[in-house]
Image (cartoon, helix red, strand yellow):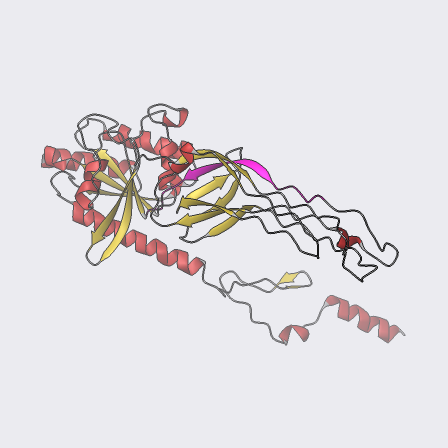
Amino acid sequence: MKFLDQAKVFLKSGDGGPGIVAFRREKFIEFGGPDGGDGGKGGDVVIEAVDGLNTLIDYRYQQHFKAPRGGHGMGKDRSGAKGEDIVLKVPVGTQVLDDDQETVLADMVEVGQRVVLLRGGDGGFGNAHYKSATNRAPRQSHPGWPGEERWVWLRLKLIADAGLVGLPNAGKSTFLAASSRAKPKIADYPFTTLQPNLGVVYVGEEEFVLADIPGLIEGAHEGSGLGDRFLGHVERTRVLLHLIDGTQEDVAEAYTIIRGELEAYGNGLDEKQEIIGLNKCDSLDDEEIAEKKAILEELADALVMVLSGATGIGVPPVLFELLRRIKDAKVEEAEDSAPGRRHPVPVHLGERTMAEPGKELQLGNDHLDQDHPADDEDDEDDNAR
């Protein structure tokens, strides 16, 4: 199956069905009156996140999606049928953006999540709706309200716990293959990886999802190489593993290039937790490893770990460190989103604020007994009288 992480589609919800003009005509009933029914509501355009999909390839071959219109009203006060909703099934992690590719209309992050993107038009009124004491036989109806239409972008951002970044040939795919059952393409030339890969990493009795993206080069944010669009697939990660080829002469330059691209891309990637992996240590002697590790530790404010994805040296400690940081990040997220979390609220009494940072405010009746300059002025006025 081919991988596609971006597609542009046209969406249109159904128009509302028209109401009709009808009158009750029945034997022995002289004045039947109006009984034209209302039109049915048009179908909605719904997007749903489903399990089992990891690409938007279906939207390469069909770009136009139109929901059916509502049915027309009928006599005997019968309303038209509602138009059937059209449902677009997308992988978990898909974002729906407006035509400007900046405004996020929906972010599908959970299996089963459904969002109504475009609402179908309401059905028009039949003539029975317009009858009144002064208009006993209305001969008017409404044609129904039109649906909505717009072009949108579907952009897939894979959901993973940890992400691999680095220059081409840094050993990212090799590390993914060594730590999971994923089978990425591995070769000794740059840009072997042309699309993101996911792997489930098992550490003891626990697991996490690791994402591997194509390599970055200097100027990727300006379109060099494969560009930086694939960085969107590690936006949702909690920690980044920055792999550096230990066999290259200037490891400091390799680190600086990737950090510069992360900062140029933005979206918080440069602020994520980072572990630096000095890879291919099996091709270095102890003196070279110590020298290059010291250079990276002096340059970066991050943990530097030595490993070799090809031989498995140092891989388990890196996986345990990734898992630890992922679990810590989940705990922090749970604490931040915990319902009913109390925050101190400053209460102003006159010109004084009775709240100290980091402490909950305890209000009693003591402040009612405190003297205020205005009270002294009132007492003087009473004495003068």
Answer with the quarter of the image where residue 206 lies: bottom left
- Give coordinates of residue 18: x percent, y percent: 68, 45
- Give how far across and how far down residue 346 sits, in percent: 59, 62
Q: What's the magenta region?
A: 143-160
- Res 186 visible: yes
Q: Which of 71 and 114 is in front in this view?
A: 71
Residue at the far front in the pictured view: 27
**Residue 157 colored magenta?**
yes
Q: Is 79 placed left or right of 186 in the picture?
A: right
The answer to whether residue 315 is magenta is no
- The answer to whether residue 146 is left or right of residue 343 is right
Count of numbered circles in the view? 0
Quarter holding the C terminus? Answer: bottom right
| Front-lying residue, 317 or 309 | 309
Q: Is residue 314 left or right of residue 134?
A: left
**Would you place residue 26 above or below residue 363 in this image?**
above
Q: Nearer the viewer, residue 195 or 16?
A: 16
